[in-house]
């Protein structure tokens, strides 16, 4: 008989599944007074409470009669626990398919993964599924474990045609088993998937992509672990994505932008794009580029680009009239030390927003590298010139990470009221002098004499300096109605002192 637990019990699922099927048929435990009162609530309300327990209160903000499949990888709570409270809760839980429709399989967390999967499949009924398969670190010394995991994988793959959302993070050792057991039935209900497949061969990658992309309802596709060494795999990977339904694409590996242009140009409803850019567009031709007509993506609202080099050509090759969110992750490593002082292309960014006449509302810029003497260079003057554009006047969220200093802070204090609608400001890494940050925050607060129409709601900064005593005023800053958070970190090396003394 399975162990009796309460909702506050944090024991592992493996404890609850001891006894497997018999745990679902256990003797009814005694009902205490608070629970008796709770059981007098309408069934519909109990179902909603159970929903929030299983899926998390932050997932569903809609009435109980309109439950949707949650977007999380893993349920917040285990519906099996609900079946151990009393006969009423067991009856409600087992007759509510959406409580069982989010399935998270991770053999490293529980040895009862097959029993867990079969229970969820059984009681989910005909409800669309959200399936996560996270299978890593197979132990070669235990062949029985591998057989068990492969059986679980085959059983799960047999229900892919029922899935609305799929998240795959399998070991490379399972790629053959995964590809061989893909169903013959297309995933007709699949709307979103996230596949992390490092170590997969090009052939297996394309077989998996052909199956997942076959869904006529696909809205979101995310790939990671696809290596550029596969040559034209990038172009072939996105070639069969349904262009008339796709709204979000994220490629978490280095890809040549030229390989993506034909795909991007054919998407009718694309709203979000994220990509690691390994090469700038070659320019010219009908596909767009510096020498040709910029590619116009009429519906794109969010763009996230990561690179180790210059994005001038990439930014110059696009026109994005509805763009509101922009993330630029400009990183480098010691293997590419010559790129340490390559700028992101601020003039090209300014040209993009002016050409597109878009209104950026959220901008995130990261300029990180190794913790070495030659940390990446940030052109603060060029960045502030771009942010001073009137097309950034609707910006309400600004996040900067890297080496910044007084140039950035004084720029945000400019008399022309740069970024007048700013509400959330975050700077991770600022070589500043005491008091500049405080002046910036207070001048952007109307009750303290600020002249900006936006009301600053959040101001967070990581100050860099030789001692905490160098920032006494900034560290003591308190502003009514503003979430002010100040941290300090000491210098790492001599180059920090050089920058601080400028």
Image (tube, helix red, strand yellow):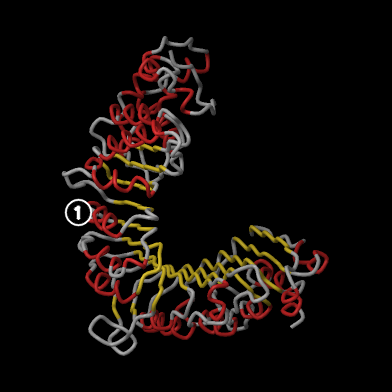
Coordinates of residue 439 in the picture (x, y in percent): 71, 72
User: Label 1, on which residue?
Assistant: 214
In this view, the residue in front, 500 or 444, is 500
Instruction: Indicate the quadrant where residue 467 lies.
Output: bottom right
Coordinates of residue 214 in the picture (x, y in percent): 19, 54
Task: Please tell me which residue is depicted at 38% across the width and 71% down the height of the picture.
Answer: 323
In this view, the residue in front, 24 or 340, is 340
Task: Please tell me which residue is depicted at 37% across the width and 15% down the height of the picture.
Answer: 22
Task: Please tell me which residue is depicted at 66% across the width and 79% down the height of the picture.
Answer: 410
Compared with 342, 493 (above or below) is above
Coordinates of residue 18 in the picture (x, y in percent): 44, 20
Instruction: Indicate the quadrant where residue 53 lies.
Output: top left
Compared with 96, 296 (above or below) is below
Compared with 198, 385 (above or below) is below
Query: In the displayed image of the protein, which residue is found farthest to the front?
Result: 141
- The quarter of the image holding the N terminus is top left
């Amino acid at each position: 008989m399975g162990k009796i637990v309460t909702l506050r019990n944090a024991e592992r699922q493996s404890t609850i599944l001891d006894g497997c099927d018999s745990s679902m048929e256990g003797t009814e435990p005694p009902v205490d007074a608070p629970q008796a009162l709770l059981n007098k609530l309408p069934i519909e309300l109990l179902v909603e409470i159970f929903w929030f327990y299983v899926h998390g209160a932050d997932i569903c903000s809609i009435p109980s009669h309109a439950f949707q499949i949650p977007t999380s990888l893993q349920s917040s709570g285990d519906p099996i626990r609900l079946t151990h409270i009393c006969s009423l809760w067991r009856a409600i839980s087992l007759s509510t398919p959406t409580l069982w429709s989010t399935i998270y399989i991770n053999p490293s967390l529980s040895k009862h993964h097959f029993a867990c999967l079969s229970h969820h499949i059984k009681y989910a009924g005909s409800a669309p599924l959200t399936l996560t398969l996270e299978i890593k670190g197979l132990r070669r010394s235990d062949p029985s474990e591998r057989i068990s995991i492969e059986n679980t994988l085959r059983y799960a793959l047999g229900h892919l045609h029922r899935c609305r959302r799929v998240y795959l993070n399998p070991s490379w050792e399972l790629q053959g088993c995964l590809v061989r057991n893909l169903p013959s039935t297309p995933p007709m209900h699949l709307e979103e998937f996230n596949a992390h497949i490092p170590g997969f061969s090009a052939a297996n990658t394309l077989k998996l992509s052909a199956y997942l992309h076959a869904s006529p309802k696909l809205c979101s596709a995310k790939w990671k672990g696809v290596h550029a060494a596969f040559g034209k795999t990038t172009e072939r990977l996105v070639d069969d994505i349904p262009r008339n339904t796709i709204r979000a694409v994220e490629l978490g590996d280095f890809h040549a932008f030229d390989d993506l242009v034909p795909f991007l140009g054919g998407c009718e409803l694309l709203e979000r794009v994220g990509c690691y850019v390994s090469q700038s567009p070659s320019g010219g031709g009908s596909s767009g580029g510096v020498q040709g007509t910029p590619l116009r993506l009429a519906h794109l609202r969010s763009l996230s680009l990561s690179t180790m080099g210059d994005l001038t050509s990439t930014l110059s090759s696009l026109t994005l009239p509805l763009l509101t969110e922009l993330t630029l992750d400009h990183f480098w490593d010691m293997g590419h030390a010559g790129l340490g002082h390559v700028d992101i292309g601020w003039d090209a960014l300014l040209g993009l927003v002016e050409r597109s006449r878009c209104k950026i509302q959220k901008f995130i810029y990261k300029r990180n590298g190794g913790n070495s003497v030659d940390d990446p260079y940030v052109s603060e003057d060029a960045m502030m010139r771009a942010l001073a554009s009137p097309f950034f006047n609707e910006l309400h969220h600004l996040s900067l990470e890297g080496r910044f200093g007084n140039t950035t802070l004084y720029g945000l204090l400019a008399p022309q009221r740069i970024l007048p609608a700013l509400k959330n400001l975050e700077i991770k890494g600022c070589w500043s002098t005491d008091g500049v940050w405080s002046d910036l925050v207070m001048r952007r607060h109307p009750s303290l004499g600020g002249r900006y129409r936006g009301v600053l709601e959040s101001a967070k900064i990581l100050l860099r300096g030789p001692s905490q005593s160098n920032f006494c005023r900034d560290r003591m800053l308190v502003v009514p109605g503003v979430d002010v958070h100040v941290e300090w970190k000491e210098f790492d090396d001599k180059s920090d002192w050089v920058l601080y003394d400028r």
